């Protein structure tokens, strides 16, 4: 297996600078590097959100929902088992109840029994609750058989989703998905929770048109934005103009103490102060704890955490989720050791010098953790990775993670076209996907995947480039800049957190948590001392003896024991 060599490159800006002179010069360059050239592009207000009316199918969805509310019908939400699916479900349930629905319930598939989406099997489970209307959230766009089964049993079906649609669409009463070819919504990056939020906005508008709120206050759907922000960040969708607004407004609610008890409890378990929260806290601290329910147990537990208004109940569930997350970490560590052994064996085989993608399978691996494993291996080797686990005696399920410039779902589509019987099912995004194959077909799939990736990359080896925003002068390495950078977000996918390079003298070094490296560094010109933390380096002990380091890092504020201090989050060591 080829070694992953990282090239550190400085971002280049090609936009004309029309930004306010009041912006810190380093933050100013960060914005320019991301194509932000004027103050209006920094507007994060809700007023700047595009109208719901450009989402195809949304008016019909609102009409069906309004009719269901007026007729007191039973509405059932069918969720996905990840953080986006959980938050989409909570937004749907809370929002519909706010808008007058009296009979709203949910089901979430057990990933180990039913798999992903509105399958006929999960429809049978749903039918036990006697729904009149089924609403899918963060799934359903590929559920042709499941939708048909629900319709045959007399249920109306609304599909709300954000995944790429297949050639054949399910025969639902209506589909709301910005990825549909004819859809005119300006953002294709909405998460499932964002799509459901927009459906509620459209429904509220219909309710107002029908005079539903005469003499009463109009429900404030902005109160759901803390949950929308969590799902959007946790699903790692691009933070385009629309998603930055949604996430920013949700963060404001959390910072002001206006979030649901479940988010507050999860932050408490993660030891994060709500008033200081940033998007990265949702992605790296809250999201994994919520996801742990769907990975190891049942996402219904995570949904209940966000649905309850009882603070004590929320805290009890958050404690359970934290324990599940700790268990998940242990399982992940064991799986990584097994994966590295497989990779070492592959490295010793000469034929694998021509490996363009990595497939890994171990029958003992946990289905709920293979996605994280694939992501870790992808980061280490800068190759697309699919990790497989046994689903039955004859079938294995894979979770795929991709690299920049390679659309992983398109790769799977290429394989499906060339080998129609090889993939039992598949779906996903550009950077992540899931699939199922017969166990006996694994070796054939490995070769087909390698060739499909090679073709998609045009026989060009991917370069692993880590982009930075330049160097920070020693005198600017301070809390004021760190605060300006934190407030300048939200940062995330395709709107990356500012990163910088710099060279420092090492004054102290020690290993913390058995696998992380903690440094006390000194700047070259001002001789100031600054702490730095390097999480999960390959060989932490081998780095203890360095006297000088050149780093790619992010400027961070370390909150500990009620005190704040400057800290460098090391991303790469030159």
Image (cartoon, rainbow, N blue to C red):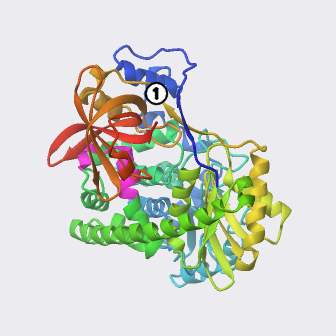
**To which residue does mark 1 refer?**
469
Residue 338, how many percent across, how many down? 52, 70
Residue 439, how many percent across, how many down? 70, 78
Name the foreground residue: 111 vs 358: 358
Name the foreground residue: 45 vs 331: 331
Q: Look at the picture and state if 343 lies above or below 506.
A: below
Q: Look at the picture and state if 316 lies above or below 519.
A: below
Q: Is residue 190 magenta?
A: no
What is the magenta range? 273-287
Callout 1: SS: loop
Q: Look at the picture and state if 482 lies above or below 298.
A: above
Q: Is residue 278 magenta?
A: yes
Would you say the magenta stretch is mainly helix, strand or loop? Answer: helix
Instruction: Answer left or right for 350 relative to 273.
Output: right
Residue 514, how many percent across, how many down? 31, 59
Q: Residue at x 45, y 49 (%)?
A: 233
The quarter of the picture where residue 267 lies is bottom left
Instruction: Answer left or right for 24 relative to 380.
Output: left
Q: Is the residue marked by circle 1 packed among few (<14), some (14-19), or many (20+) residues within 10 Å?
A: many
Name the foreground residue: 11 vs 47: 11
Quadrant of the rendering where the N terminus is positioned: bottom right
Q: Residue at x 60, y 49 (%)?
A: 3
Look at the image and tell me whether residue 105 can be seen.
no
Residue 225, how many percent across, how many down? 39, 49
Instruction: Answer left or right for 461 relative to 382.
Output: right
Name the foreground residue: 73 vs 161: 161
Q: Look at the picture and state if 54 lies above or below 23.
A: below
């Amino acid at each position: 297996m080829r070694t992953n060599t990282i090239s550190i490159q400085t971002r280049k800006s090609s936009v004309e600078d029309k930004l306010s002179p009041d912006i810190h010069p380093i933050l100013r360059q960060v914005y320019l590097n991301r194509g932000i050239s004027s103050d209006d592009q920094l507007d994060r207000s809700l007023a700047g959100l595009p109208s719901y009316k450009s989402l195809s199918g949304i008016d019909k969805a609102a009409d069906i929902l309004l009719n269901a509310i007026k007729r007191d019908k039973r509405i059932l939400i069918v969720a996905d088992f990840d953080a986006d699916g959980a938050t989409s479900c909570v937004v749907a349930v809370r929002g519909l109840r706010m808008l007058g629905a009296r009979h709203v319930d949910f089901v979430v598939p057990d990933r180990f029994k039913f798999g992903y989406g509105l399958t006929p099997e999960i429809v049978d489970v749903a039918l036990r609750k006697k729904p009149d209307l089924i609403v899918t959230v963060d799934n359903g766009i590929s559920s042709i058989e499941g939708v048909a089964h629900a319709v045959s049993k007399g249920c109306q079906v609304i599909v709300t989703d954000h995944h790429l649609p297949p050639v054949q669409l399910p025969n639902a009463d209506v589909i709301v998905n910005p990825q549909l070819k004819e859809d005119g919504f300006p953002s294709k990056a909405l998460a499932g929770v964002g799509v459901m939020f927009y459906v509620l906005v459209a429904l509220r508008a219909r309710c107002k048109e029908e005079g539903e709120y005469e003499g009463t206050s109009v429900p404030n759907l902005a109160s759901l934005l803390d949950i929308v922000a969590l799902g959007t960040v946790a699903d790692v969708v691009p933070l385009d103009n629309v998603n930055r607004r949604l996430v920013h407004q949700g963060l404001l609610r959390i910072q002001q103490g206006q979030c649901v008890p479940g988010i507050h409890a999860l932050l408490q378990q993660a030891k994060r102060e709500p008033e200081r929260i940033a998007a990265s806290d949702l992605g790296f601290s809250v999201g994994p704890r919520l996801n742990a329910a769907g990975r190891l147990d049942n996402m219904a537990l995570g949904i209940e955490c966000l649905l309850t208004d009882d603070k004590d109940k929320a805290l009890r569930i958050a404690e359970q989720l934290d324990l599940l997350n700790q268990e998940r970490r242990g399982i992940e560590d064991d799986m990584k050791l097994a994966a590295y052994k497989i990779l070492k064996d592959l490295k010793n085989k000469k034929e694998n010098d021509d490996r363009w993608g990595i497939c890994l399978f171990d029958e003992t691996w946990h289905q709920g953790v293979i996605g994280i494993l694939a992501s870790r291996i992808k980061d280490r080797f800068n190759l697309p990775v699919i990790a497989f686990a046994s689903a039955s005696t004859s079938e294995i399920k894979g979770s795929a993670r991709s690299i920049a410039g390679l659309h992983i779902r398109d790769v799977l589509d290429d394989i499906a076209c060339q080998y129609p019987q090889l993939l039992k099912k598949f779906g996903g995004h550009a950077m992540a996907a899931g699939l199922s194959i017969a166990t006996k077909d694994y070796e054939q799939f490995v070769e087909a995947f390698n060739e499909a990736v090679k073709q998609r990359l045009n026989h060009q080896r991917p370069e692993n480039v880590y982009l930075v925003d330049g160097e920070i002068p020693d005198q600017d390495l301070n809390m004021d800049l760190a605060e300006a950078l934190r407030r300048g977000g939200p940062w995330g996918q395709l709107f990356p957190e500012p990163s910088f390079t710099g060279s420092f003298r090492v004054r102290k070094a020690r290993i913390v948590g058995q696998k992380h490296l903690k440094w006390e560094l000194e700047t070259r010109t001002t001789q100031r001392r600054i702490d730095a933390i390097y999480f999960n380096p390959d060989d932490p002990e081998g780095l203890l003896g360095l006297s000088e380091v050149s780093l790619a890092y992010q400027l961070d504020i370390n909150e500990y024991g009620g005190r704040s201090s400057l800290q460098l989050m090391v991303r790469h060591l030159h």
